[in-house]
Image: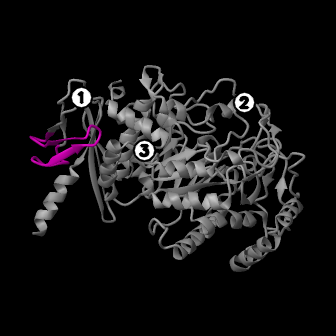
């Protein structure tokens, strides 16, 4: 609980960040932190801190696009559009919100044009504000902005050292409504509904009623759906779109089958805007080889974009893909059981990473049990791959700490665990996950609680700005040190609980020591033996204090419960300067 007792300056800084302005005194401190982390190790996807947000729920910068295509505010609670847009994300990037949280990847829900009408899916009238009910994969949904807004968002993210992970859907379209007609039978199936007993009843079926399933198994040529032809003609872009499709199929040699049309449309977002990776929705509900094909064409598009935009790219890393294989857990290793005796290795079908559905349960374990198990598995059978851990998500009704009673522990476990970390928008501000009156997954999708952060609201014995500051300190340290998510874990002491992380690969070398649950007395001796040498000056990034190693231990003048320890950069700079003389 001592994490709640942060300095008044920290609270004021968080409030200023929420408002989008930083007083001069704090700006200097923030710049010092930025300078200290700017020259750190290269970005690694295995250590990424991914911020996952629903664009419509995050921040509304342009009220003029709140209701497009005749949509209304007539849905069930938290099932209508609420105004968030691409310009809102861009504004928060410029305000430093993500930078000061240590975020280096933003995962964007699909920005493609959604069905225009609302529909009742069993929990009241709903709209496609979430992005998973596509109507046209080639257009930006007008509720979120324009193509120019999309380009500005990606360019701004890249300019601030942040990569973009785009959510893509290969499995289904949006529900059928009077305004959103079903596509031809050659494109989609509308039955049977999946029963999830084996591969056939998981892939060749519709996830739920009235959610047309794209025939990704087909290799037969199909013509464009009439509804899409009419739409493109009305928008004056039919000829251009058809010419691009002709070029795509000529270049790839693929048949004009449904899945290849989708691959063209999805990879256009890479080619046009430079998104750095895909998060594949409903991955196990599509033939595994489809993802491998998508990876191939997306990688080619990414390399093309980097060649054409050398000043905008963030590096020479390959295109990245992580997959939502529902219920996959790290403990499953390389193989996922599809039922009836069949398993699939999704890692060998285009994916660098899989979302770890097991983390929310694993997080109930002790720190050491969690950390050591994850390190062993990731550096064992999963060496070369990774997982994306999360504590809460947009459609998981059983998150870790549903009531937001343990936001500090949640941060420790998520941001300090081996593997990549996914922050669901508002994890860092204890946003409500069980919104009153909302049913089903809508309860997990409340608007970002900017007002609570700006007002430093008190809840359950803690203040929102204190929570945000704790997540920020951990996140910034994580971003500066790839050893945290990608390195080897080893416990150093039980009391206080202390561990090290070390990474030494491909010319990158990094090492840190972290201590948790430190007593309130201050001046606690922390072992760093075998990691840092006697006489070396170390810095605790959590408190901002420094100390010298003596007899394999270090003591910081801090009464805070966390110590994030690494070599003091200013001391190292002096040593290097002397060595050059």
- Front residue (pair 22, 34): 22
Q: Position of residue 203 (x, y in %)?
A: 73, 51
Q: Is residue 535 magenta?
A: yes
- Circle 3 SS class: helix
Extent of the magenta region: 529-553
Q: Could you tell me how far apart the alpha carbons at marks 2 and 3 are, in whole angstroms?
A: 30 Å
- The residue furthest top is 461
Tag 1 residue: 559
Q: Are marks 2 and 1 in contact (CB under 8 Å)?
A: no
Q: Residues within 10 Å of mark 2 (few under 14, many from 20)?
A: some
**Callout 1: 10 Å neighbours few (<14), some, many (20+)?**
some
**Residue 496: where, in percent of width, then height?**
24, 30
Tell me, yes or no, if residue 98 can be seen here: yes
* Residue visible at 88% across and 48% down in the picture: 179
Q: Name the residue located 48 percent from the left edge and 43 percent from the top edge.
A: 20
Q: Main secondary structure of the magenta part?
A: loop
**486 is higher (above) or lower (below) than 405:** below
Q: Is residue 519 above or below residue 73?
A: above
């Amino acid at each position: 609980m001592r994490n709640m007792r942060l300095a008044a300056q920290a609270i004021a800084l968080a409030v200023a960040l929420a408002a989008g302005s930083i007083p001069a005194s704090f700006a200097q401190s923030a710049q010092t932190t930025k300078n200290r982390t700017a020259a750190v190790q290269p970005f690694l996807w295995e250590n990424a801190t991914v911020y996952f947000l629903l664009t419509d729920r995050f921040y509304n910068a342009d009220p003029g696009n709140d209701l497009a295509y005749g949509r209304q505010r007539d849905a069930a609670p938290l099932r209508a559009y609420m105004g968030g847009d691409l310009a809102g994300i861009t504004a928060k990037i410029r305000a430093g919100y993500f930078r000061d949280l240590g975020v280096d990847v933003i995962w964007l829900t699909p920005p493609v044009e959604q069905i225009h009408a609302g529909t009742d899916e069993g929990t009241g009238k709903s709209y496609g504000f979430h992005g998973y009910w596509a109507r046209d994969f080639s257009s930006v949904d007008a509720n979120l902005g324009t193509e120019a807004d999309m380009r500005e968002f990606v360019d701004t993210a890249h300019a601030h050292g942040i990569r973009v992970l785009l959510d893509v859907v290969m499995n289904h379209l949006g529900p059928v409504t009077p305004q959103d007609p079903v596509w031809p039978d050659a494109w989609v199936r509308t039955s049977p509904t999946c029963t999830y007993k084996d591969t056939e009843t998981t892939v060749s079926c519709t996830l739920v009623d009235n959610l047309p399933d794209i025939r990704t198994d087909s290799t037969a040529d199909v013509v464009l759906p009439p509804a899409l032809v009419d739409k493109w003609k009305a928008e004056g872009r039919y000829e251009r779109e058809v010419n691009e499709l002709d070029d795509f199929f000529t270049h790839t040699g693929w048949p004009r089958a449904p899945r290849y049309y989708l691959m063209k449309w999805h990879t256009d977002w890479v080619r046009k805007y430079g998104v750095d990776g895909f998060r594949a929705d409903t991955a196990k509900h599509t033939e595994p080889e489809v993802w491998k094909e998508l990876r191939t064409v997306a990688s080619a598009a990414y390399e093309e974009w980097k060649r054409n935009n050398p000043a905008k790219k963030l590096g020479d890393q390959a295109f990245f893909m992580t997959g939502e294989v529902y219920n996959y857990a790290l403990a499953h290793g390389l193989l996922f059981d599809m039922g009836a005796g069949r398993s699939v290795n999704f890692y060998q079908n285009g994916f660098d990473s899989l979302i770890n559905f097991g983390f929310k349960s694993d997080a109930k374990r002790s720190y050491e049990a969690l950390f050591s198990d994850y390190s062993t598995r990731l550096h064992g059978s999963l060496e070369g791959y990774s997982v994306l851990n999360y504590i809460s998500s947009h459609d998981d009704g059983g998150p870790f700490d549903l009531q937001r009673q343990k936001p500090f522990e949640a941060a420790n476990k998520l941001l300090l665990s081996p593997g990549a970390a996914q922050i669901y928008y508002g994890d860092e501000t204890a946003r409500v996950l069980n919104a009153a009156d909302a049913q089903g997954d809508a309860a997990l999708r409340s608007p970002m609680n900017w007002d609570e952060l700006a007002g430093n609201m008190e809840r359950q014995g803690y203040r929102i700005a204190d929570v945000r500051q704790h997540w920020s300190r951990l996140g910034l340290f994580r971003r500066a040190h790839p050893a945290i998510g990608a390195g080897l874990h080893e416990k150093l002491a039980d009391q206080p609980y202390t561990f090290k992380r070390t990474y030494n690969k491909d010319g990158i070398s990094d090492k840190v020591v972290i201590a948790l649950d430190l007593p309130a007395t201050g001046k606690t001796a922390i072992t760093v033996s075998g990691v840092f040498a006697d006489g070396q000056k170390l810095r605790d990034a959590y408190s901002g204090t420094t100390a010298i190693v003596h007899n394999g231990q270090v003591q910081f003048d801090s009464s805070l419960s966390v110590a994030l320890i690494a070599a003091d950069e200013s001391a190292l700079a002096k040593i290097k300067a002397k060595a050059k003389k």
